Image (tube, rainbow, N blue to C red):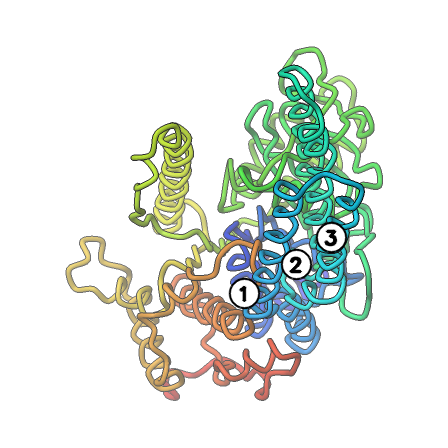
Amino acid sequence: MTDRLRQHGDAPLGVALSGGGHRATLLGLGALLYLADAGKGATINTIASVSAGSITNAYLASLPESPLAARQSFEPHVAHLMRKISGDRRWWLASWSLVAVVSIWFFGILFWTSVDEGWPWRLAVPLAVLVLVALFIGPRSGGSLWAWRGTWLWLVDLALSLIPGTYLWRTVDGTWPRAGALAVSFVLFGIAFFGRGYALRWSLSRTITPLGSRGKNRATLEEMNKQIEHVICATELHAGTHTYFGRDFIYTREFGFGEPARMPIATALHASASFPFVFPVCILRARKHAFRFPDVERKPRRLLVLSDGGIVDNMADAWQLGAADRARRLTWLNRVQDDEKLVAFVNRLKSVPETLVVIDATPPPVSQGVGAALLPLVTELFGVARAAGVSHSAAVQTRARDLEARFASGAVRGALVASAKSPMDVITAVLDPDNPDKPADDVIERATKARSYLAARFANEDFRAFPSMTMASGTYLTPVGAERAAHIVLHGYLQAMITLHITLGYPLLAQAPVRDDFRRLAAGGAISTPPVGSLSAAAV
């Protein structure tokens, strides 16, 4: 790493990839592509991530070598991951429409036709159609979750789980026998429903399969490439703190420092991206990882119960900003035993870069309808869910404001690249004459230069619509579509270039890719114009 940094003459750089569904995955790709084009990719020595930002991080970690040094090496991987995530929204909607029709057919037979000798065979027909949809039609939808046949077959498993309990309910009499039938249905459906966690893990393991490979990504944490410190973050629910997965460590304050023990990268990704209310928690056995030096003096717990990394810190900045404190705490805990692996881990914590670029795909606060609050019984569940969402959103917005304040004051060197803004919003905020905190003259000069650059190079873009188009992309529960994927990667690229040029003096590229270039990437092609060095002031 030191030789690479000396060769490129730059200080080491840390990158944090936030959560935010497919939007976060694609925004991070665009920002990293800009850093590669700007000659900064080789200076990156840490990438931390939460939630769907971990899809990008896990994919890069699985490669034998980091491709971020130049566009020529990184661009094929950007195109590969874009194609996997884009999918076809219309095909996905058509597939689900077919599933809905077959489900109505199945439930009609299950609940309303007579239970006789032909009942199982009548049920078998819609189930067979559902299997055919799962094997041959649904996977063509693409996307992180639905490109894998197993996710669609999980729907068949849900249908099958309902048959035994329904059969018992319809063929027995009496209160207690029927109560038993309901219990059977509840247990079997619950077990099948919990299987969506495995569907998430195995589908994501195929999403991060490297270019040129097929099937599942079987790489383990120990096989992460060594050129960059890739850290995947999840939330440990016992103490409500982060769990960090790296090449040769697992660390969480509740359990301490542990060994990866050949854990697949896909398992760490599953834990990081398993957002609550939609996917179940990810459970790991603690004994396997030989944890030691916990912060909490208590009887060791047997299980790690993990959920989405964005619950604690949706910006993914805690790994880097908390590194010094983490190093001091572990050094004190290790003062007697002098554990060699922990010493090496602490030394790496001390070398975490001082410059931090946060790629933030968090949506801004929005007003939502609350009609469900008027429904009896539903109002309690709605109130809890909405209150949790508002609390999380407020915490994320507070953290973003705190980060921006620390960057602006110079307490931390870095920048927040936010998808909730457009590139022009960043420029306008700097050049606003009513800004009470007048920026430095060199910052104003760079913002003026960036405004002229966008007007010349991207005159046809409606920058006011950038945030809304990007935010329209949902979670990884649905495919994004090629056009929207191209837009989000373009947004990430331009947002990173303008923000980092103004705040850190990174270059404006003379031949930055335009929207059609990213459309070609989403279709499996290549960017037509090679990257050219930064523009001179005279050129602008």
Give the CA separation, mark 3 to mark 1.
28 Å
Which of marks 2 and 3 precedes in the sequence?
3
Q: Which residue is mark 3?
A: 127
Give the CA separation, mark 1 to mark 2.
11 Å
Residue drawn at 45 percent across, 69 percent down: 491
Number of the label disc, if any, that sits on residue 296: none
Mark 1, secondary structure of its residue: loop
Query: Mark 2 is on which residue type?
Result: Trp
Number of the label disc, if any, that sits on residue 480: 1
172 relative to 502 in the view: left or right:
right
Res. 412 visible in picture? yes
Which image quarter: residue 143?
A: bottom right
**Whether residue 390 is situated above or below residue 269 in the rendered picture:** above
Q: Nearer the viewer, residue 401 or 219?
A: 219
Mark 2, secondary structure of its residue: loop
Q: Which residue is mark 2?
A: 146
Residue drawn at 70 percent across, 74 percent down: 73
Callout 1: few (<14), some (14-19), or many (20+) C-alpha neighbours within 10 Å?
A: many
